[in-house]
Image: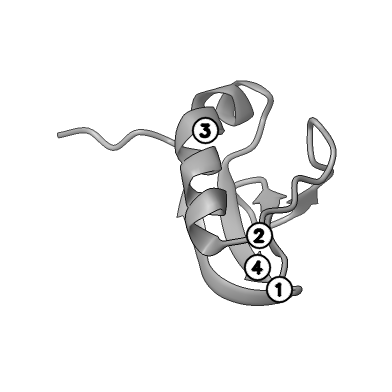
């Protein structure tokens, strides 16, 4: 199994991965990576992400924009 993130604009249009496609051996590794890099991705124009396992959608889209609290 390979876990990847699909990067999208707010309208759902797919973006090319800013640093190339990252592949992860587990869901936890993929989620840790997004937790560590979401601010950089947002700065590079990514609005939301979708988690994929072997190309199949697991969840998302998940916004990278902070919510007001």
Picture layout, residue 41 above or below residue 8 = above
- Give the number of callouts: 4
Circle 2 — which element?
Answer: loop
Tags 2 and 3 touching, CB below 8 Å: no
Q: Residue at x 55, y 74 (%)?
A: 58
Pair 3/1: label in front: 1
Q: Which residue is mark 2?
A: 25
Q: Which numbered tag is attached to residue 38?
A: 3
Could you classify mark 1 by the number of other residues whose Cα lies within 10 Å: few (under 14), some (14-19), or many (20 or more)? few
Mark nearer the N terminus (4 vs 2): 2
- Image disc number at residue 1: 1
Residue 18 x/y as whole percent: 79, 32
Q: CA distance from mark 3 to mark 4?
A: 16 Å
Q: Are marks 1 and 2 in contact (CB under 8 Å)?
A: yes
Residue 4 locus on image (x, y percent)? 69, 57
Please provide percent x and percent y for residue 53: 66, 72
Name the one closer to the observer, 34 or 46: 34
Label 4 crowd (10 A; few <14 / some 14-19 / many >=20) = some
Farthest residue, direction front: 25
Q: Which residue is mark 4?
A: 52
| Residue visible at 67% across and 49% down in the picture | 8
Image position of 16 with respect to 27: above or below: above
Whole-angstrom CA distance, mark 1 to mark 4, is: 10 Å
């Amino acid at each position: 199994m390979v876990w990847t993130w699909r990067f999208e604009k707010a309208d759902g249009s797919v973006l090319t991965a800013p640093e190339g496609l990252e592949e992860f051996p587990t869901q936890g590794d993929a989620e840790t990576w997004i937790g560590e890099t979401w601010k950089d991705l947002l700065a590079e124009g990514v609005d939301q992400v979708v988690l994929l396992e072997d190309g199949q959608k697991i969840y998302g889209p998940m916004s990278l924009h902070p919510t007001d609290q």
